[in-house]
Image (spheres, rainbow, N blue to C red):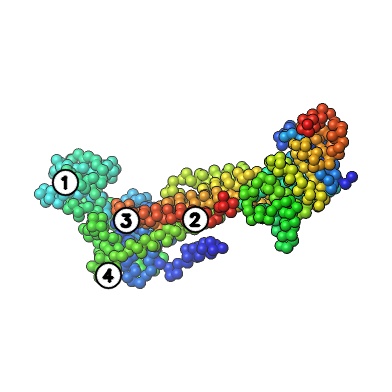
Amino acid sequence: MRWVLAVASLFWALAVHGTEPIRVASKNFNESYLLAEIIAQLLEDRGYPVERRFGLGGTLICFEALVTGEIDLYVEYTGTLGQAILGVPEVMGRGALNELIADRGIELLEPFGFNNTYAMVTPRALAQSLNLTSVGDLAAHGDLNVVVSHEFLERDDGWRGLARTYDLQADAVGIEHGLAYQAVADGGIDVTDAYSTDGELRRYDLVVLRDDLGYFPQYLAAPLVRSALADDVKTAIEGLADLIDDTRMQSLNAEVVFNGRTFAEVANEFLVDWGLAQRRDTSNGLWRSLAVNTTQHLKLTGIALLGAILVGVGLSLAVFRMPALSKGVTYFCGLLQTIPSIALLALMIPLFGIGPLPAIIALFLYSLLPILRNALTALTTLDPTLTRVALAMGLTEWEQLRFVYVPLSLPSIFAGIRTAAVISIGTATLAAFIGAGGLGDPIVTGLALNDVGLILQGAVPAALLAVATELLFEALERWLLPGHLRRG
Amino acid sequence: MNACVSFEGIGKSFVPGQLVLDDVNLSLPAGATTAIVGESGSGKTTLLQLVNAVVRPDQGTIRVFGEPIPEDLVKFRRRIGYSVQGAGLFPHMTNRDNVVLLARLEGWASADIEGRYASLLEQMGLPEDVSDRYPGELSGGQQQRVGLCRSLMLKPRLLLLDEPFSTVDPITRVGVYESFQNVQRHEGVSTVLVTHDMREAVKLASTLVIVNQGRVVQAGPTADVLAKPDGDYVAALLRGQLE
């Protein structure tokens, strides 16, 4: 009974939001988090409640979530919106893009000002000595050591096109992107490709060569919002228009990536500098976020597990007397298990959008197999003498289940539930990719930032939770064990 | 003769082409004990399980106290006691719960349950302290006595016993026989006992039914069968086991 109440209240908590918060989302890389946090803090400072759905696993997830109304806004880039999402070959400005997306109920607000596109970069000292300011200047220096990322080297709209456009003579060779910055700083490379707002440009003191001929498409960052969002909210967000140029974005990124500061700190500092928000306490977020994430994690796994127990045990009781059907159900659940968890989560998005619901459904499907299989095995392998006696003495089907089948299968059913619980707690860390929150949140962010500390903030509590669950179930098991086994 | 169970033209096979029972016609007397004797695989257990409809016949009719087996099997089976080899007690219930389960489900008043339970315990020669223990904590003989109590709890008119004494050691068995016969005399319940043990059959039953390979080879009062075995098989069976 208490369990039923607990389930009911959890569903209630999920269903009821109180005053509708503005759901601000981000993709899972540094700049996207940072801009989303800036918008979130700006809105909070204006008194709007905000729900952060940060670290969604990629462009299409964000876009789909926005179109289906799962989120209210995220920061997108004009080039990405045009080419990757809408599939239009030519570079388009904000106005043209807004015409294309208007019928989907979304719109692009005023850009922040910077252009995060491909860029050719070179050490400042070299640029000054050779007087290099634009890509065109490279034409006169065919002897420069140009090393670019493999992808840039291969892509048609990468190095080859650039060399054709600017008539560059240098022979470029490929390198792993992550190594290029260090190599440039060490002087091993003269020119490489980069993203124009990477924090590394600040750190290694690299200059971006101007793309005078407009070879690289424009990737202007701008808030992509649901048109239905209130006008005052849109106006508030557009207060950020043109405030962040390439250099500022570079240094904001560098603050997080190299100086180890949190998104909240950097975002707040930026807003305070521009007089857009009050200073806020961003220091003691650790315990609070730990509590929030852990609670959310337990909510996700708890609801999924309860659902899986009800369906798994119920289903096995319904089919165990029919061997063919039992086999079919077990195979089906086994099939679900073979889908990689991240793929299963992705499969949920077109059906259930993003957020806790699809995550809970995916976790539910994962938990089903161990519970179902253990229950079915136990129910079908009971001592045949006992089941024959139960039938022959005149117990109804229900009484046979109630007094014989279920109590005798209980230890095995419980072991299945225990396995499912521990698997769920581990798998639920992936739910952060589809905006469900939980202890996966710091892990996903940490992965994006390559921040081990942040990753551990999610991984350690998740591991502890799994151990605690084991212990809890062990105690419960002892308590629930049939008397003859306890005494024996 | 009043029959407690009658088999009329019973045929049964579990695997097509292999008859477990072949045209069985039998009438078992009410108010007495009949032993169905045969080797393993003779079809004797199937014959017993046809009576409480755990197994259904392919051909023929079974009547219990003159009536064909009704639609409502639950109600029907509750009027027939059933006890098996090794007792078949539910290991997760105390001995008391095993015995009184059906009475509770039938909605008996708790005073009636207690009264009946106590009287069975006494008649079966079980000490009171077995009540709150689990079957696994009793000896084989005690488990068998508890099993018999369970099958008698609802005061059935008919009792079906499937080798209930075979796992009990010979010395203990004599005591269990006595307790059982004591209850039987007291309650006048018609009993069908399946056994492979001719000595047990002769001791407990007034009627013998000898089955071999799915056919009844001889049936009649125990004294008659002992005096005039019908054919070599019965003679050999009697000789082999009684000497």
Q: Secondary structure at mark 4?
A: loop
Chain of the residue where label 2 is placed in the rendered structure = A
Q: Are marks 1 and 3 on the same chain?
A: yes
Q: Which residue is mark 1?
A: A186
| Mark pair 1, 3: CA separation | 29 Å
Q: Is residue A244 visible?
A: yes
In the depicted structure, whether residue A379 falls above or below residue A7: above
**Labels 4 and 2 share a subunit:** yes
Q: Earlier in the sequence, mark 2 or mark 3?
A: 3
| Mark 1 / mark 3, whichever is N-terminal | 1
User: Nearest the camera: A34 or B205?
Assistant: B205
Q: Amino acid at mark 2?
A: Ala
- Please name the residue that numbered disc 4 is placed on: A279
Residue B167 drawn at (x, y percent): 68, 41
Output the chain of dot 3: A
* Gap in angstroms between the C-alphas marked 3 and 4: 24 Å
Going by the image, does B134 lie left or right of B162?
left
